[in-house]
Amino acid sequence: MVATFIGNIEARLDEKGRMFIPAVYRKILAAEQSTRVVMRRDTENECLVIYPEQVWNKRVEQLGEELDEWNPDDQMLMMQFVADAEYLEPDSQGRILLQKRNLQQIGATGDLLIVGMMNRFAIWDKQTFLNKKIGQREFAEQLRKRMSKKSF
């Protein structure tokens, strides 16, 4: 089974910086037999990306295959990609602890939005996501351009 995280779900942090993984996402993780997830800051956007452990392992393996382990620039790229990641173990209630430094990096102020990304999901400050999100007309145009290049 391939994990399919879709939709967007509002969330809040508790006083300790914990956030519930939405129940629908927890079911997907359970079906994938993922007891841990991996979190890293997105390379381009102001959000945190949560990967099921198996998806993360595959992503790192793919990156490793693309990089030359003897090239110092490639070594640094791999180290930085992996160094910016951390394992998170959901507690018995399905909460994950988000470190303050990670929340500060994405400008999280309290209201969060969890956004599905098919095989992973992202955690955004709600207002940042709404400000960054493109308008419906531009979205339709970009989607049409991308999809017209594919044949099904």
Image (cartoon, grey):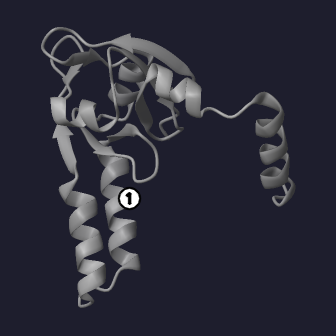
The secondary element bearing badge 1 is classed as: helix
Q: Is residue 150 above or below residue 23?
A: below
The percent coordinates of residue 138 (x first, y second) are 79, 39
Q: Decide if residue 62 is on the left or right side of residue 133.
A: left
Residue type at numbered disc 1? Arg
From this viewpoint, is residue 6 visible?
A: no
For the point 35% across and 29% down, which residue is it? 29
For the point 57% across and 24% down, which residue is it? 130
- Foreground of the two, 89 or 29: 89
- Foreground of the two, 142 or 1: 142
- Residue 112 falls in image quadrant: top left
- Foreground of the two, 127 or 79: 127
Count of numbered labels shown in the rendering: 1
Q: Is residue 36 above or below residue 83?
A: above
Q: Residue furthest bottom?
A: 70
The percent coordinates of residue 8 (x first, y second) are 53, 21
Q: Which residue is mark 1?
A: 59
For the point 48% across and 41% down, which residue is it? 119
Q: Decide if residue 107 is on the left or right side of residue 152.
A: left
- Foreground of the two, 53 or 138: 138
Q: Is residue 66 above or below residue 110?
A: below
Q: Decide if residue 44 is on the left or right side of residue 74.
A: right
The percent coordinates of residue 75 (x first, y second) are 24, 78
